[in-house]
Image (tube, rainbow, N blue to C red):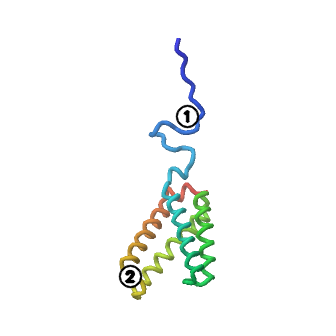
Amino acid sequence: MNKPELPDELHMKIPINPATGTQGNPLLRLPGLIFIGLYMLGLSALVTVRVVSHQAHPLYLVIAVLFTIASFGLVRMFRWAWALTLAAVFLPMSYCLWLILHHAMPYEVGVVQIILNLLLFLYLVRPEVRAALR
């Protein structure tokens, strides 16, 4: 007589059926939030490098800290971090547009940054993203 196989510990933690998806962790249902969190950490590192190399005023370190806080808060799915990230994505997009219009930034670089920030902004305002936050 064949005994039915009991699922091992790994199969109990990870859903096997792809139709059910990743039910446990809401962050895995929204992988864009992971990318946006890493993007915010990258922006924070870029601002810090610019301050250390004396290309930006030391006051910009406050912005780098806010980017870092927004990144970790967004990965933890906090609503306040969503609002902070939304502002941190929208404001550089607007600033790049202003620099392009005043010919202080190369057109190609500015357009790429504007499009990337616009896509991230549109991802963040999706109802699925807002509903998953706590």
Q: Distance between the residues labelled 1 and 2?
A: 52 Å
Q: Where is residue 123 in the image (x, y as percent from the top left)?
A: 46, 62
| Quadrant hosting residue 62 | bottom right
- When the figure is inspected, residue 101 is found, relative to residue 11, above or below; the finding is below
Q: Which mark is residue 106?
A: 2
Point 54% across, 44% down: residue: 23
* Quadrant of the frame with the C terminus: bottom right
Residue type, mark 2 in image: Pro
Q: How crowded is mark 2: few (under 14 residues within 10 Å), some or many (20 or more)?
A: few
Q: Is mark 2 on a helix, strand or loop?
A: loop
Q: Is residue 63 left or right of residue 119?
A: right
Q: In the rendered view, does 2 fall on the left or right side of 102? A: right
Name the spot of residue 53 as percent of width and height, x first: 57, 81
Contact? badges 1 and 2 (CB < 8 Å): no
Secondary-structure class at tag 1: helix
Residue at 60% x, 66% y is 70
Q: Residue 11 carries which label?
A: 1
- Crowding around mark 1 (Cα neighbors within 10 Å: few <14, some 14 to 19, many 20+) is few
Q: How many labels does the image show?
A: 2
Point out which mark residue 71 bears.
none
Q: In the displayed image of the protein, which residue is found farthest to the left?
A: 108
At 57% from the left and 36% from the top, the residue drawn is 10
- Residue that lies at the very extreme toward the front in this rendered image: 53
